[in-house]
Amino acid sequence: MNLLFLSYWGLEDSLTVSTVFPHLRLLQLLPEVRRIIFVTIERGASAGQELHFAPGFATDKITFAPLRSRQNQPLLLNKIDDFVRFPNELVKMVHQHTIEVIIGRGAPAGALAYLVWKKTQTPFLVESFEPHADYMRESGVWKGYDPRYLFQRYWEEKQKQLAIGLMPVAENYRRKLIQEGVNAQSIVTVPCSVNVADFRYDAARRQQVRARLGIAADALVGVYVGKFGDIYYDAEAFDLFRDAAAYFKPNFRLLILTPNPEAEVHAKLAKVGFTAEQVFVTKAPHAEVPGYLSAADFAFATIKPAECRRFCSPIKVGEYWAAGLPVLLTEGVGDDSDIIKQEGGGATFNLNNPATVPAALQQIAFLLQQPGYRERIQALAIEHRTVARAAEAYKQLLLPLAVSLV
């Protein structure tokens, strides 16, 4: 079977490294897969750069073929151009490489897969399938009349109707899709996978990172990995950091790993009362993130609440759990907030109910006092975020098709 794997992110995007590369590795191991054409969407500076595909494992079956957005155009025009030009380029790849199945990573990539299907009838499946259009609207990034919202929502309906398989990231969404009439046999839940071995707590790295950053061995360290704004809290996140510092007193230190401009982040931290000695802010390569997580004691996942958040699976929560960190998580996020309430692994808060914040911090403090808490929390990642779930999904959704193609 010849596959075209389409990521809507760029090659060097942290989501590509953390969520796409592990799945490419799984697909390459399937004997039924002869060849994989791996396609990314390159925007901005990366669209004009030479790119080197080096995922850290042998790529005997994989050929990297990026699609590049036009530069020096407004974002909206770029998006429109992408959904006109990119499908035509993908159609050429389908014919050139005799592609038999397209896998789209995420609903925007699934939209492109659907547009290619219209011209070639090439079967496609969509992994990490979420209601992306509603995410963007409910987060205030898109308006209900925005063409991006209207087209994306229409394309998501087409994916539900025509994809040979959907891999939502939350059981909550699988159940909703079945209620909407999607064939249950074509839906397999696969939360965003994490390589637990890569993120496992390492006491030696903890000491090294703390020594390098000048953090005392007895300091209590919170860590945040990710962006501010869009679907994530911005000013509210910094208020939450302030509340944590007030709760844990002078012993508290904060690590922030973010692509947001460092100077802006420091200014927002200063505004809520942090001193330079209390915080460390950087944009860390994905390979360095596990070391910072080992240096921390608990983690923040400050995702904006919305009805559709019940259907997501933040990769950062899986990485936090893999490092054995209790997570301070917004209430109503994917299956994760339910797992936290039922199995432990952190605490949830709801900013519409301010009393939940000190209660959640109290729960985090309680967990940190429990012997062996990191091992128990890491077990949640092994149970709920292992890449083995993706392997089983590929076998269920792809292998029957491979047999029919023989």
Image (cartoon, rainbow, N blue to C red):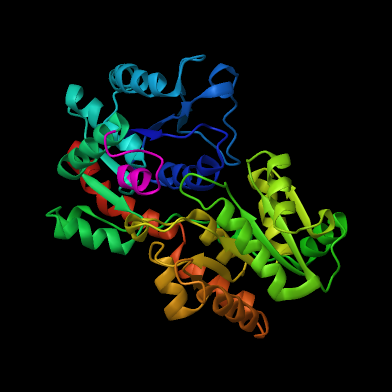
Q: Is residue 297 visible?
A: no
Q: Is residue 84 above or below residue 127?
A: above
User: Looking at the rendering, in which quadrant would you find the N terminus?
Assistant: top left
- Residue drawn at the location 23% of the way across and 32% of the way down: 114
User: Looking at the rendering, in which quadrant would you find the C terminus?
Assistant: top left
Residue 23, position as x, y percentages in the image: 44, 46
Residue 232, position as x, y percentages in the image: 50, 51
249 horizontally vs 107: left or right = right
- Residue drawn at the location 21% of the way across and 48% of the way down: 400
Residue 194, position as x, y percentages in the image: 51, 56
- Outermost residue to the left: 181
269 horizontally vs 93: left or right = right
In the image, 338 versus 15, the foreground residue is 338
Q: Is residue 16 above or below residue 290?
A: above
Asked which quadrant contains residue 78, the reply is top left
Q: Is residue 247 visible?
A: yes
In the image, 38 versus 219, the foreground residue is 219
Q: Which residues are magenta?
A: 132-145
- Residue drawn at the location 78% of the way across and 60% of the way down: 205
